[in-house]
Structure formats: structure tokens, C-alpha cells
Image: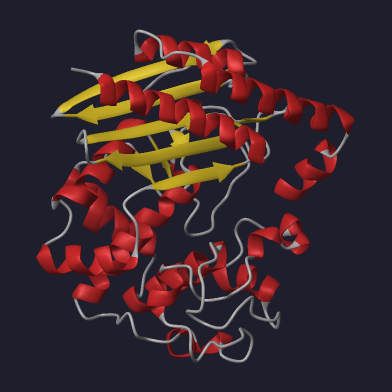
């Protein structure tokens, strides 16, 4: 769908829309901060967002903000407790699950890909040298299946290695561990590794070892597990259809959650509620404590601000090109600045 939409939108009107977004973003940088987060969230709708949800957890208190539409066709207002496709924020949960298996000695960060998934040994360059640690840290050099034209025609229900086969026999982007390059194939393969190690779906393991202990009752591994009416609709600028029914099932991008649940998870990931001391040390050595997410129609940011002890989650049910992402970041940063200026 990503490539199909891009084909539709590479046109004069889209270029003009991008330029207008850039001008709007520059203007936003010059505007003074409003008197409240509510006002900033309301103004975000005037910047081309269909709907926005913001969740803040600070000093033991949670605040919820929303504006715009949950479903613009049926004129349903944005609900701060609605479910949302969190896209690559899902990678935090997979990294946490992997951490627990490493601490339990069911996996080692030094295991190489060829040993972990023998089927790919002759199909992925440097499989014998790429370690689990490198895949977690996006330092493998493996090409990203998401940007291959063949992916647009793939079946959402196919097994993980069938999806991975899109990049089989392609040259590595760089030698293992020589640089960083964000790559969805890393977490697709980690999903397969977790399933092989556990002997059952890593989705069930995440549910039992992470979601249940933390009481995250509004977090799901797959869109198919939820009532579609509970999920915020998703829109791509210049493309009229609601993209909510597009089902992304691959590990590292498939999860659905409320903003509050993402905030609670991020807080637990940081404060020791999720991990014991050994697990915390392992996680800190391999992955980050924040993430963004992007799917057609869905953009998200989840971060912790240690100087003000605040977890901030921003969901916007609109997506477009890189210039639009800059607009999302500017709104997020303005909200963070407002929290910093609070007495």
C-alpha cells in the first residue's frame, strides 16, 4: 500500500501540498506557545491533522488530550482512549521480549543469524556474522523488505520467511556492525527467531510476560484481535479512503494500543517495573527507550523526558511524506516545551 499510495501522490498537487506544509511548519516555529496543551492540540487540526491524541504521564498523574476526528467520514470526534495502530513502536515490545529470553539463557546476543534460522544461511549476506545484538540495534546491513516493490503485492497472512524472501540474495548494504541503518527486516527475522525459540507465537509470549503483568488491557499484537470500531481511522494526505482495514501483520509493526497503554509500557520499561536488574542492563545495552511509528494513515511518537520525568505519547491519524513528519515533530516538541515551562 505504501508504494501504491506514493505512485498516486507523486504529482503537482502533492508537491504543492508539501511546500505549503513546509511554510506552515516554519511559521509554527515562530509562534509563541499557547496557554495550555488543550489549545495546542486543538490548533494541530488546523495544520492538516485529521485527528490527534496526546497522553502525558508526569509525577504520577495522567492527562489526556484529543482533537479532530476519530472517523472523519462519520463525523465521530477523536477519543483519547481509542485504539491506534502504533506501527514501529511495536519494536520496543519485541526488544523487551528478546531481553527476557536472553536473561533466561534461551537466547544469546552473540548467536548468529545462520545458527538461529538455518534456512536463511545461504540467502542473506553475512548471515554467519550477523548477531542477534546487531539485528536488535539495526547494525546488520540487511536490506529492508518494506521498500522493495515486491512487498506491495505480498499476502498479510504469509509466514515471516516468505516476506523475508523478498530480500534474499540481495547484497548487504554494509558489512555487519559497521554502521547503523534502520531496517524492518531485522525485527521481522527476530519475530521468527522468537517463535522458533519459544515453540509458539511470540505474540502470546509478549501478552503473558509483558502485557498481563503490567495490566495493559488495551494493547494487542494484531489488528485482527480487536473490534474495528474501537480503532481510530487512518488517512493519507491526498488519498480519500480510510486506511484502517489495511492489515500490517509483520513483527515490529503490527501492534494496536491506546495511548495510555503505550505510556504505561514506556514508563515500566524505564523505571524497573518490567525488568529485573539483569534484564534492565541487557535491554539498555541493545535498544532505546523511545520510538516513533509510521504506517499509511498512522503516525506516532512515544518518548520519555527525564529532566521533567514525563512520558509523552502523540498519535495522529494522518500520514504523508517527510515534510509532514517534520510538522508532527514540531507539534510534539511544542507540547514538550510547554511541559518544561510548567511550574
- Does 150 sit above or below residue 270? below
Q: Position of residue 91 (x, y in %)?
A: 42, 56
In which quadrant of the rendered view does residue 278 lie? bottom left
Total labels: the figure holds: 0
Residue 54 appears left or right of 246: left
**Does residue 185 appear to the left or right of 5 in the view shown?**
left
Looking at this view, name the residue that lies furthest to the left: 277
Residue under the point 34% across and 10% down: 36
Q: Residue at x 51, y 79 (%)?
A: 178
In the rendered image, residue 164, in percent from the top left (x then y), is placed at 61, 71
- Identify the residue at horizontal 59%, vertical 13% (top origin): 46
Q: Is residue 75 left or right of residue 67?
A: right
34 or 136, which is in the foreground?
34
Position of 149 relative to 268 (above/below) = below
Colour mode of the rendering: secondary structure
The location of residue 165, given as percent across then percent down, is 66, 75
In depth, the one of 36 and 191 nearer the eye is 36
- Among the 4 quarters of the image, the one containing residue 111: bottom left
Residue 239 in sight: no
Nearer-the-camera pick, 249 or 96: 96
Left or right of 106? Residue 38 is: right
Q: Quadrant of the C terminus?
A: top left
Q: Quadrant of residue 185?
A: bottom right
Residue appearing at x 76%, y 41% in the figure: 5
Q: Position of residue 81 (x, y in %)?
A: 36, 24
Q: Residue furthest toward the right?
A: 12
Amino acid at each position: 500500500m505504501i508504494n501504491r499510495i506514493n505512485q498516486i501522490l507523486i504529482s503537482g498537487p502533492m508537491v504543492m501540498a508539501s511546500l505549503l506544509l513546509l511554510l506552515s511548519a516554519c511559521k509554527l516555529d515562530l509562534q509563541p506557545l499557547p496557554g495550555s496543551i488543550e489549545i495546542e492540540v486543538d490548533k494541530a487540526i488546523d495544520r492538516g491533522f485529521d485527528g490527534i491524541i496526546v497522553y502525558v504521564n508526569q509525577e504520577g498523574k495522567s492527562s489526556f488530550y484529543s482533537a479532530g476526528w476519530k472517523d472523519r467520514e462519520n463525523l465521530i470526534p477523536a477519543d483519547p482512549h481509542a485504539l491506534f495502530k502504533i506501527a514501529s513502536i511495536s519494536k520496543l515490545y519485541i526488544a523487551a521480549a528478546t531481553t527476557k529470553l536472553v536473561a533466561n539463557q534461551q537466547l544469546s546476543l552473540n548467536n548468529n543469524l545462520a545458527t538461529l534460522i538455518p534456512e536463511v544461511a545461504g540467502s542473506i549476506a553475512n548471515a554467519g556474522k550477523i548477531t542477534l545484538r546487531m539485528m536488535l540495534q539495526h547494525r546488520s546491513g540487511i536490506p529492508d523488505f518494506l521498500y522493495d516493490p515486491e512487498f506491495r503485492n505480498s499476502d498479510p497472512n504469509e509466514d515471516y520467511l516468505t516476506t523475508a524472501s523478498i530480500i534474499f540474495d540481495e547484497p548487504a548494504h554494509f558489512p555487519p556492525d559497521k554502521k547503523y541503518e534502520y531496517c524492518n527486516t531485522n525485527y521481522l527475522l527476530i519475530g521468527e527467531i522468537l517463535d522458533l525459540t519459544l515453540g509458539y507465537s511470540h505474540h502470546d509470549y509478549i501478552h503473558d510476560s509483558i502485557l498481563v503483568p503490567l495490566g495493559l488491557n488495551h494493547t494487542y499484537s494484531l489488528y485482527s484481535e480487536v473490534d474495528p470500531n474501537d480503532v481510530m481511522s487512518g488517512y493519507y494526505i491526498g488519498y480519500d479512503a480510510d486506511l484502517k482495514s489495511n492489515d500490517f501483520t509483520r513483527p515490529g509493526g503490527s501492534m494496536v494500543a491506546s495511548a495510555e497503554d503505550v505510556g504505561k509500557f514506556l514508563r515500566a520499561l524505564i523505571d524497573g517495573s518490567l525488568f529485573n536488574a539483569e534484564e534492565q542492563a541487557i535491554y539498555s545495552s541493545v535498544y532505546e527507550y523511545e520510538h516513533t511509528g509510521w504506517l499509511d494513515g498512522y503516525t506516532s511518537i512515544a518518548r520519555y523526558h527525564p529532566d521533567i520525568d514525563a512520558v509523552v505519547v502523540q498519535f495522529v491519524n494522518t500520514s504523508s511524506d517527510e515534510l509532514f513528519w517534520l510538522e508532527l515533530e514540531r507539534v510534539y516538541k511544542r507540547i514538550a516545551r510547554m511541559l518544561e515551562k510548567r511550574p
